[in-house]
Image (tube, helix red, strand yellow):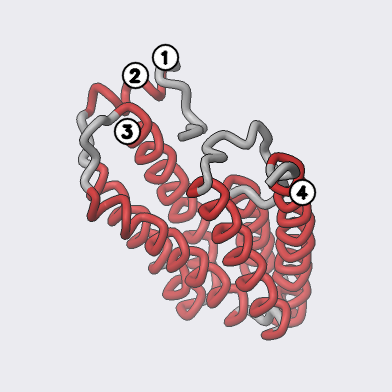
Amino acid sequence: MRTRVPADSLVGRVILSARFQPGALVGVGLLASLLVPLCVLVGGPVILAALPLIGIGALAEASYMLLAARSANLSRRVMVFEPLAARMAEAAWLLALWLLGAPGWAVTVTGALCWMYVLTRARARQVGLNDLGMVTLGERSVREVVVALGFGAAGVIAVAGGGQYEDWIGGAVTVAVTAWMLLAALGLLQLVIVVSTALRND
């Protein structure tokens, strides 16, 4: 399993020495993401609280991946529910972006593309392609950056946008969702090409 945090790095050593429970990390990451739509519903400067929440989710996921890669007896329950928690987290982000004014069709298409990407990668691993040897534009880390930028722009506009902030926020999150959708589509295309090449002789 590829990890974003090397085990021999300072952050990696801290994570491993803290002896976090993988299931607890999954739960923390999911809870942080589910709080994002609530921040949006409150509105105003509270929208900026989505940024640390997304950061907590990203750190929890990276910590889980590192522990999962280093563990020989990871709970099967955690392994089953971790992908579900990740999809629920992304659904919460998309819901929050929709609440801020992103078009429903773009939110729906983006969610579908992410689902297809994750399903394709999971199926590839099932047939033995455990390490595809590439990082695509559809990776979770890319989604996190795009979403964070979208909420950051929305939060700043909500604080300093004046009477027109609602229109400006809608435009900002529409740009963020559109960027996410395009990156997800390109990432899926990259993944399909790599998998097709690897399985050319089948």
Q: Which residue shows up at 44% across the image and 16% down it?
A: 9
- The earlier-in-sequence mark between 4 and 3 is 3
Residue 30 image-quadrant placement: bottom left
In terms of secondary structure, where does tag 3 sit? Answer: helix
Task: Specify the amino acid type for callout 1.
Answer: Asp
Residue 50's x, y, as percent?
50, 60
Q: Which residue shows up at 21% across the image and 41% down it?
A: 21
Task: Specify the amino acid type for callout 4.
Answer: Gln
Q: Decide: marks 2, 1 in contact (CB < 8 A)?
A: yes
- The earlier-in-sequence mark between 1 and 3 is 1
- Estimate how packed mark 1 is, as few (under 14), some (14 to 19) or many (20 or more) residues with alpha carbons within 10 Å: few
In terms of secondary structure, where does tag 2 sit? Answer: helix
Task: Specify the amino acid type for callout 2.
Answer: Arg
The residue indicated by pointer 3 is 67
Q: Which residue shows up at 41% across the image and 45% down it?
A: 61
The residue indicated by pointer 1 is 8
**Disc nearest the viewer among 4 and 2:** 4
Q: Which residue shows up at 67% across the image and 61% down it?
A: 150
Q: Which of 47/201 is in front?
A: 201
Q: CA distance from mark 2 to mark 3?
A: 11 Å
Q: CA distance from mark 4 to mark 3?
A: 28 Å
**Disc nearest the viewer among 1 and 4:** 4
Q: Which of the numbered marks, if any, corresponds to residue 190?
A: 4
Residue 44's x, y, as percent?
55, 73
**Disc nearest the viewer among 4 and 3:** 4
Q: Residue furthest bottom?
A: 104
- The earlier-in-sequence mark between 1 and 4 is 1
